[in-house]
Image: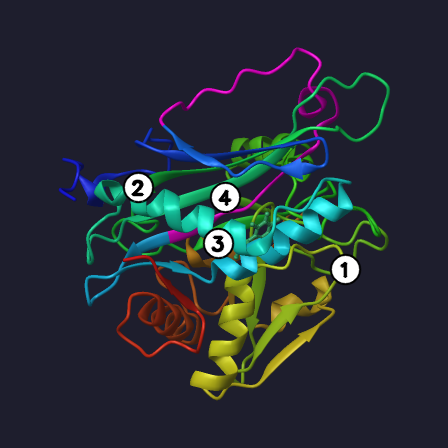
């Protein structure tokens, strides 16, 4: 398919309407067969459960063109699996995993004109989501649901190189113990909006959230998991039941161990030990790893030795190896690359 006339390298991270999206509806206890449609609008009753009680979950992943010219998606089976646990936690029906992967495949295949070319740095971002669609006024789960997948081309995350971020320790909490921090639900983002807007107003790029119970352990940011590098070159990543299990972070842990031979610890990380680390990064689909240069804890500055100019050397190696695997320059572990065409 002929590519759209888009300036790929200068695309931002925003919504661009593409040709087709996938829709399946759940009614009377079953999912319908699902269709690709050109209609990008959703018409809902004013009392739809999602509008009143925020019964909605989502996923995010990317498709892109490899060095070999194939269009692929990265580990969509893990997004299907994670969406299943999100659905269960919010009393929503599960959209079957094989059908999830099939929906991703169909949406990408129907929008290949929007898949950025290899080397542009841009990718096709996919957004699967599901919400309670019928009217509900007394608090209970919806009886009807809609599952959708749309895609939008997004630009290179780091234009002109990855500039390390400055983040602050937040006074707001992200996720309660035994709450919903470990699922990908819109509700976790609604309550993070005030925290991120005020962080930006004060000149910070992101919030570091601590565990609400003791405010002593590092959890994550609003939309990315932490990965730290110790002074002797090992990798440490926080472990907590209220962290969202990032697929990027899990992939980087595998890469660190199996490709780079690094020692990896997944454990509780105290805020008080962060000053001893050599490097810090934020992991998520959007950027893979964003380096953090400075963490500010109520006026106390923790400056990572990797500095404010570039990624630290271990972060860089992790980033290059995982993006190399994704782009087909380095051999991928079995099952990581889902070929679409
Ligand atoms: C989506 C998300 C991440 C990153 O997960 P990936 O699967 O790597 O994209 C991290 N934290 C939160 C809170 C998220 O919602």
Q: Circle 4 is placed at which residue position?
A: 205
Residue 51 visible? The answer is yes
* Label 1 environment density (alpha carbons within 10 Å; few <14, some 14–19, many ≥20): some
- For this rendering, which residue is in front, 182 or 24? 24
Q: Circle 1 is placed at which residue position?
A: 241
- Which mark, residue 110? 2
Between the residue at mark 2 and the residue at mark 4, the CA separation in whole angstroms equals 36 Å
- Which mark, residue 101? 3
Secondary element type, mark 3: helix
* Label 2 environment density (alpha carbons within 10 Å; few <14, some 14–19, many ≥20): some
Secondary element type, mark 2: helix
Quarter of the view holding residue 118: bottom left
Secondary element type, mark 1: loop
> Going from the N terminus, do you reach mark 2 or mark 3 first?
3
Between the residue at mark 3 and the residue at mark 1, the CA separation in whole angstroms equals 26 Å
Which of the two discs, 2 and 4, sits closer to the camera? 2
Quarter of the view holding residue 19: top left
Which of the two discs, 4 and 1, sits closer to the camera? 1
> Is the magenta region chiefly helix, strand or loop?
loop
Residue 271 location in percent, x, y?
Answer: 71, 62
């Amino acid at each position: 398919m002929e590519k759209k006339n888009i300036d790929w390298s200068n695309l931002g991270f925003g919504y661009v309407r593409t040709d087709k999206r996938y829709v399946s509806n759940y009614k009377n206890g079953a999912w319908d067969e699902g269709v690709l449609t050109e209609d990008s609008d959703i018409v809902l009753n004013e009392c739809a459960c999602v509008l009143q009680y925020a019964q909605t979950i989502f996923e995010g992943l990317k498709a892109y063109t490899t060095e070999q010219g194939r269009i692929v998606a990265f580990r969509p089976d893990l997004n299907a699996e994670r969406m299943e646990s999100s659905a269960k936690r919010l009393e929503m029906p599960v959209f079957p995993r094989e059908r999830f992967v099939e929906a991703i495949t169909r949406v990408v295949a129907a929008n290949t004109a929007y898949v950025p070319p290899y080397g542009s740095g841009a990718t096709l971002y996919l957004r699967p989501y599901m919400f309670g669609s019928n009217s509900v006024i007394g608090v209970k789960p919806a009886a009807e649901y809609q599952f959708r997948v749309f895609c939008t081309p997004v630009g290179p995350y780091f234009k002109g190189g990855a500039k390390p971020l400055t983040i602050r320790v937040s006074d707001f909490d992200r996720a309660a113990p035994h709450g919903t921090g470990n699922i990908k639900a819109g509700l976790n983002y609604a309550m993070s909006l005030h925290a991120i807007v005020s962080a930006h107003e004060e000149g910070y790029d992101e919030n570091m959230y601590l565990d609400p119970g003791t405010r002593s352990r590092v959890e994550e940011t609003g939309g990315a998991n932490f990965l730290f590098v110790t002074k002797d070159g090992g990798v440490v990543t926080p472990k907590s039941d209220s962290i969202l299990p990032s697929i990027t972070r899990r992939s980087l842990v595998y890469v660190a161990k199996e490709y780079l031979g690094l020692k990896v610890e997944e454990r509780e990380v105290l805020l008080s030990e962060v000053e001893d680390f050599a490097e810090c990064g934020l992991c998520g689909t959007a950027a893979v790893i964003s380096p953090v240069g400075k963490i500010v804890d109520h006026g106390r500055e923790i400056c990572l030795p990797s500095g404010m100019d570039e990624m630290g050397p271990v972060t860089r190696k992790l980033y290059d190896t995982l993006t190399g695997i994704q782009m087909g320059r380095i051999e991928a572990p079995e099952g990581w690359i889902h070929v679409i065409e």
